[in-house]
Image (tube, helix red, strand yellow):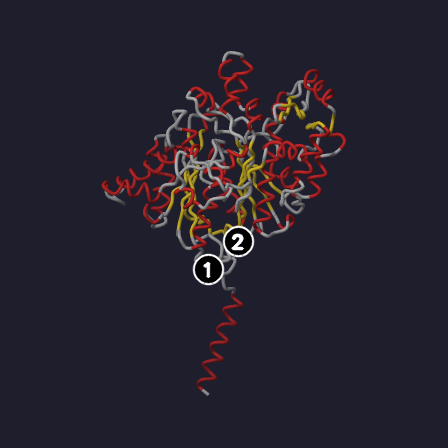
């Protein structure tokens, strides 16, 4: 049995209401087309403050400010039952305010694309200096002279050379410049998305380094698995977010590459990283994903129409560190992997069968051997008003129905199975972010304290979005308690010889 240890993990949110209001795909196109003035004008009245976002139970769960059990027990609706003692930092990561994140974006810029107003840059650099994971070198990069300009210069850059404004507190505080005159892959709007993705990935990687106790130079290889694509007109998504993120975080001994698969990307990236570690190709591997500006306020049209708060105001990111199995860390099992084959089809029952039932059956396990199934962990208070239902609940219901069909449980036991083995959604609708991997941290914590034995992480993707195929996609893996035996901790031939000699010597001593 091939296993790989999960040593550490980090989860962060960046509160981005003003950026989302202007550049999230739904409000951006509504504003651009000029056909939904009522929606565009009303959206600002439906935004959460930073304090409200911090007090929102799913957000606290995401950064580890709540344990999973505490989150499950939190009173709903969460928007009406805010957490009075909520803090910026949790066990896994943090919720960073928008002004500081704009500063972090500037620090992650290598080509003088992000200009910040001088006073704003100086103020946010001072704030970032108080963050426990932000290094002095990153803080200094915020206030580089070429990245600071006066407002008149910023205004001219936007109006004359097609830049995009950056706003905070209802005011223009900077801009993202266009990288090319005719290449639409390098227009300011796209570069903003890519820089935000990079910066949010950097934040989670920095928290992962802190949480793991490793030095940045200890990291060997990084796989980035968001949904953004960086490139130019000749290769639209050939860029390497992984190495760009590693560079800012100081991982000078690391290399890296990107893995893409829409919402299934993170699970496929975890499998790819674990395989490299298990084979000995890499001494350790980090999987990291930045967040997505386009997904901010994706469902806000429905939220505004129904008089609700627009909750999609946070970019999510995460990082996980995989190491050789030393018999101590929770492990990924590489012999229990689900895959959505080309021939499986897109019917929900077929997808659930290949991602859940078939890998369990191959490993001699059944549905009830898995404590928690984590698939598509969307926050239901976001998706329900938009007509998408409670996605995590729908997933566990399908798993329960399949368990009945395969005679693993009785039909009368379905509700109890759903309650015991299902998960409540706590991840923002960022596409790749909700798809299973946010539960890795909670699963590992529960396995370490003995309250859980095994969890299944399930990622599902929608490949039709690229207009190349109507196929769906998906992958899954098992996390469980370490067995104590591993490739890394296995007994060598020399150890065996030594043990035999010791045993013979002890026997000879007794005979004498």
> Is 446 placed above or below 437 here?
below
Q: CA distance from mark 1 to mark 2?
A: 11 Å
Instruction: Find residue 64 and name its label.
Output: none
Residue 233 shows up from this direction:
no
Q: Nearer the viewer, residue 493 or 451?
A: 451
Tell me whether circle 1 and circle 2 mark residues in contact (CB < 8 Å). no
Residue at 46% across, 49% down: 444
Q: Which residue is mark 2?
A: 324
- The number of callouts visible is 2
From this view, report whether residue 367 is shown above or below residue 382: below
Q: Is residue 100 left or right of residue 50?
A: right
**Residue 341 in view here:** yes
Label 1 SS = loop
Label 1 belongs to which residue?
A: 485
What residue is drawn where x is 49% and y is 69%?
Answer: 496
Percent coordinates x, y for residue 243 in the rendering: 63, 39
**Along the line of sight, which residue is nearer the eye, 264 or 447?**
447
Above or below: residue 333 compared with residue 80: below
Give percent across and percent down for residue 6: 50, 50
Residue at horizontal 51%, vertical 66%? Answer: 493
Count neighbours of disc 2 (C-alpha within 10 A) and say few if under 14, some if 14 to 19, many if 20 or more: many
């Amino acid at each position: 049995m091939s296993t790989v240890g999960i040593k550490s993990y980090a989860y962060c949110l960046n509160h981005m209401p003003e950026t989302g209001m202007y550049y999230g795909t739904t409000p951006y196109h509504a504003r651009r087309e000029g056909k939904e003035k009522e929606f565009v004008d009303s959206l600002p009245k439906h935004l959460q403050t930073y304090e409200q976002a911090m007090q929102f139970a799913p957000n606290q769960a995401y950064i580890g400010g709540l344990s999973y059990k505490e989150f499950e027990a939190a009173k709903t609706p969460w928007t009406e039952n805010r957490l009075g003692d909520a803090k910026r930092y949790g066990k896994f990561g943090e919720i960073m305010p928008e002004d500081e994140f704009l500063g972090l974006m500037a620090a992650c810029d290598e080509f003088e694309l992000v200009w910040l107003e001088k006073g704003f840059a100086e103020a946010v650099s001072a704030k970032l200096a108080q963050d426990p994971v932000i290094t002095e070198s990153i803080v200094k990069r915020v206030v580089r002279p070429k990245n600071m300009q006066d407002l008149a210069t910023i205004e001219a850059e936007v109006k004359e050379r097609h830049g995009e404004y950056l706003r905070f507190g209802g005011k223009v505080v900077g801009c993202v410049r266009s990288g090319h005159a005719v290449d639409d892959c390098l227009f300011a709007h796209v570069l903003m998305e890519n820089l935000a993705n990079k910066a949010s990935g950097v934040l989670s990687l920095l928290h992962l380094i802190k949480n793991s106790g490793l030095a940045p130079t200890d990291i060997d290889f990084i796989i980035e698995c968001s949904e953004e694509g960086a490139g130019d007109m000749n290769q639209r998504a050939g860029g390497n977010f992984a190495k760009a993120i590693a560079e800012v975080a100081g991982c000078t001994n690391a290399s890296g590459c990107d893995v893409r698969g829409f919402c299934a990307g993170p699970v496929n990236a975890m499998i790819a990283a674990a395989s490299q570690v298990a084979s000995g190709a890499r001494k350790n591997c980090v999987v990291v994903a930045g967040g997505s500006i386009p997904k901010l306020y994706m469902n806000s049209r429905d939220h505004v129409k129904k008089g609700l708060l627009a909750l999609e105001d946070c970019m999510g990111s995460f990082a996980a560190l995989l190491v050789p199995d030393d018999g101590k860390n929770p492990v990924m099992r590489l012999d229990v992997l689900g895959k959505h084959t080309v021939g499986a089809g897109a019917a929900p029952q077929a997808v659930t069968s290949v991602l859940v039932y078939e890998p369990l059956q191959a490993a001699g396990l059944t549905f009830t051997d898995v404590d928690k199934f984590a698939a598509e962990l969307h926050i239901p208070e976001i998706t329900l008003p938009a007509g998408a239902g409670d996605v995590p609940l729908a997933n566990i219901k399908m798993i329960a129905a399949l368990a009945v069909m395969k005679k693993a449980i009785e039909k009368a036991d379905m509700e109890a199975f759903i309650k015991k083995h299902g998960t409540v959604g706590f991840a923002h609708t960022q596409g790749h972010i909700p798809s299973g991997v946010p539960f890795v941290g909670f699963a590992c914590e529960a396995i370490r304290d003995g309250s859980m034995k095994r969890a299944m992480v399930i990622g599902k993707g929608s490949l039709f979005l690229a207009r190349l195929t109507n196929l769906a996609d998906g992958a899954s893996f098992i996390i469980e308690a370490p067995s104590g035996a591993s490739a890394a901790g296995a007994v060598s031939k020399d150890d065996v010889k030594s043990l035999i000699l010791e045993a013979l010597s002890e026997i000879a001593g007794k005979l004498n």
